[in-house]
Image (cartoon, rainbow, N blue to C red):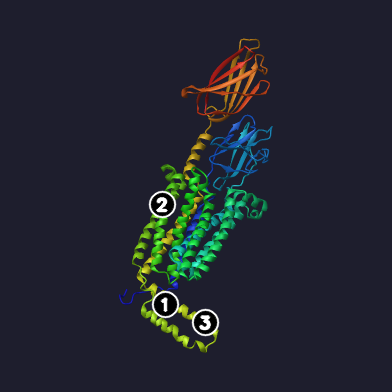
């Protein structure tokens, strides 16, 4: 490189094209790998147990099937289906009953009476509280296992072609949001002259168009995405109405309304604001646009916070505003980075002051990202084991590593920014020469037609811009800054993709809790259902008999209790009073009273009998056969 004639590098036309091609190739590669390697989005809620259990063989047909989940879910009429061995519905086809109590989320469906022996299939599908569809199936048998003709689709909820298109729209929505918000903030805060630059206008408008189109696609595909998986159902008006009644549907509609306000903001920013010349009026309009644009941007960010991970789980009231701040910081940093890249490659007018202002904005955004990211990581992961042992935790580690790389590259960009000057923009000699060239055609302008004069004016403008850009491109500091910003943008594309993946991945904290809950909820009882037979004698007339007790499923949690009393002749025997109590003496728990209800002659029952802990429980039974004749008998049983 000569000291007197520095090499300007490739032509100013080829460089932007090459940079754009490189970024486009990187975007295509990253999103292609993500979409090719990712199945349906992992969900927040998980099945933690069922009654009957998967693979269980029960002696008599249950009256209902219940399913327990780790988090709140939304269910519909066909969310839980029970199919007999021939594939016919064995449930009553009513909407599942909400049996939740305390912290347990449980739903059940009633079964037809008199079901024959055989293997039954339970297929379920619901929507998790963070908007992701979940589904699954299991079997149980009555009497003995049998062959079944039931064939369920292997496609999980949220999968198939509809799932792929929906996921593409999700990625595009985040990308559009970053360009829209980050590009607008870059113009208002860092480079107000960018409001008149066509490349900056195109960047922000394309961000708005991308976000709007992606939101419409997600709204139309929401019904088939969470249901049938068929594109034709996107135009089912009844299905669309049901989507609008859900939290994700309301969030998407709210986003579209806010994008209407964003369109007005863009029109003012690149219209009235760009043409305003009075400095005081421009300053006042800047303040108004900043306030209005900030409110709209926060509202759009809130449409994600109110319908995804932040809206469910612990501390949701804190997590949602934190998530909004996190998204706005991401947009200001990464969207501003994209704007700076476009300005450096496509416009000749951006100066060092604008670059330094963006450096300050980027630093502030990183501070906000660090604070909100630490809180989000604690909330969504919760433990070191979840950080390293779950997919969410591993993606989070990758995200942190990418941020570290991005900060390292940004450090180099900051060094180039410190060296950047505006002296090479238009040297005095160049200005004089350009002025001479610009005035030469004016002497003949009166002798040519107006059309020709306009054409010559356009040509002069292009030549002037080209010369100014060539001078800027010859500046080694500016060239170094362009290369480092391009590297930042490349890392930012990957970072944004990983961040989007995190929003559709089950948080590490809930994945561990669900795994632990599933182990506890589905572990078979040590002895299965408890069956006891206890003879008694109250001492009075007809005071002898036998108490038979069934406790099903005979494990910790909720159990169904049935008590039969047979007289000395073996026939059902009614008594005036029957009471039970359960005591776990080794843990000083109890006695826990149980008062069953009379169901038929000699038959009492109680549902929802809670066994808080596994162990050797003593069951006391008090039987009263007359006003003065009663007895209390007991027997130990291992439960759980």
Comes first in the chain, label 3 or label 1: 3
Residue occupying the point 47% across, 86% down: 442
Residue 239 position (above or below residue 452)? above
Residue 187 in view, yes or no? yes
Comes first in the chain, label 3 or label 2: 2
SS at mark 3 in the image: helix
Residue carrying label 3: 455
Residue 155 in view, yes or no? no
Residue carrying label 2: 370
- Most extreme residue toward the bottom, as rendered? 447
- Circles 3 and 1, Cβ within 8 Å, touching? The answer is no
The answer to which quarter of the image holds residue 124 is: top right
Residue occupying the point 46% across, 23% down: 586
Q: Position of residue 35 (x, y in %)?
A: 52, 55
Residue carrying label 1: 467
CA gap, disc 3 to disc 1? 18 Å
Comes first in the chain, label 2 or label 1: 2
């Amino acid at each position: 490189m000569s000291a007197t004639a520095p090499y300007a590098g490739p032509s100013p036309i080829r460089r932007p094209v090459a940079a754009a091609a490189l970024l486009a190739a990187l975007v295509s590669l990253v999103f292609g790998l993500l979409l090719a390697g990712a199945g349906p989005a992992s969900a927040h809620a998980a099945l933690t147990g069922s009654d009957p259990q998967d693979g269980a063989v029960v002696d008599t047909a249950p009256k209902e099937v219940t399913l327990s989940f780790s988090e709140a879910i939304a269910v519909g009429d066909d969310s839980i289906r029970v199919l007999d061995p021939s594939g016919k519905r064995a449930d009553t086809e009513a909407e599942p009953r909400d049996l939740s109590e305390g912290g347990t989320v449980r739903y059940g469906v009633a079964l037809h009476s008199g079901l024959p022996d055989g293997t039954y299939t339970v297929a379920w599908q619901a929507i998790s509280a963070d908007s992701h569809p979940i589904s699954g199936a299991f079997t149980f048998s009555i009497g003995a296992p049998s062959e079944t003709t039931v064939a369920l689709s292997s496609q999980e909820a949220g999968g198939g072609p509809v799932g792929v298109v929906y996921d593409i729209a999700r990625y595009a929505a985040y990308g559009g949001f970053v360009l829209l918000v980050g590009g607008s903030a870059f113009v208002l805060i860092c480079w107000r002259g960018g409001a008149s630059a066509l490349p900056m206008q195109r960047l922000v408008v394309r961000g708005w168009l991308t976000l709007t189109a992606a939101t419409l696609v997600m709204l139309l595909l929401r019904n088939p995405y969470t249901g049938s998986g068929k594109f034709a159902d996107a135009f089912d008006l009844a299905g669309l109405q049901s989507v609008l009644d859900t939290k994700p549907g309301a969030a998407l509609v709210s986003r579209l309304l806010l994008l209407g306000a964003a369109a007005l903001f863009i029109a003012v920013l690149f219209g009235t604001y760009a043409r305003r010349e009075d400095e005081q009026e421009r300053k006042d309009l800047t303040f108004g646009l900043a306030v209005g644009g900030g409110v709209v941007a926060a509202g759009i960010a809130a449409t994600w916070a109110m319908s995804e991970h932040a809206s469910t789980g612990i501390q949701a009231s804190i997590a949602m505003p934190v998530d909004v701040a996190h998204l706005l910081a991401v947009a200001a940093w990464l969207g501003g980075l994209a704007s700076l890249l476009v300005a450096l490659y496509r416009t000749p007018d951006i100066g060092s002051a604008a670059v330094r202002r963006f450096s300050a904005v980027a630093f502030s955004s990183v501070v906000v990202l660090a604070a909100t990211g630490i809180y989000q990581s604690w909330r969504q992961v919760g433990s070191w084991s979840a950080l390293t042992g779950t997919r969410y935790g591993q993606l989070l580690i990758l995200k942190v590593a990418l941020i570290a790389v991005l900060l390292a590259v940004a450090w180099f960009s900051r060094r180039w920014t410190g060296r950047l000057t505006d002296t090479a923009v238009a040297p005095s000699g160049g200005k004089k020469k350009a002025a001479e060239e610009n005035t030469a055609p004016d002497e003949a302008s009166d002798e040519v037609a107006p059309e020709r004069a306009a054409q010559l004016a356009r040509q002069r403008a292009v030549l002037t811009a080209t010369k100014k850009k060539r001078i800027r491109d010859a500046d080694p500091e500016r060239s170094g800054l362009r290369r480092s910003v391009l590297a930042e943008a490349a890392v930012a594309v990957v970072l944004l993709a990983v961040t989007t993946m995190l929003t559709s991945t089950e948080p590490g904290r809930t994945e561990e809790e669900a795994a632990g809950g599933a182990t506890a909820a589905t572990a078979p009882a040590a002895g299965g259902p408890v069956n006891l037979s206890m003879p008694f004698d109250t001492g009075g007339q007809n005071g002898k008999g036998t108490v038979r007790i069934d406790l099903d499923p005979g494990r910790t949690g909720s159990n169904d209790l049935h008590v039969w009393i047979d007289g000395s002749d073996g026939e059902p025997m009614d008594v005036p009073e029957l009471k039970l109590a359960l005591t776990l003496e080794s843990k000083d728990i109890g006695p826990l009273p149980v008062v069953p209800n009379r169901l038929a002659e000699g038959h009492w029952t109680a549902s929802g009998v809670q066994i808080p802990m596994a162990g050797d429980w003593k069951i006391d039974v008090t039987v009263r056969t007359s006003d003065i004749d009663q007895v209390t008998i007991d027997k130990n049983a291992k439960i759980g």
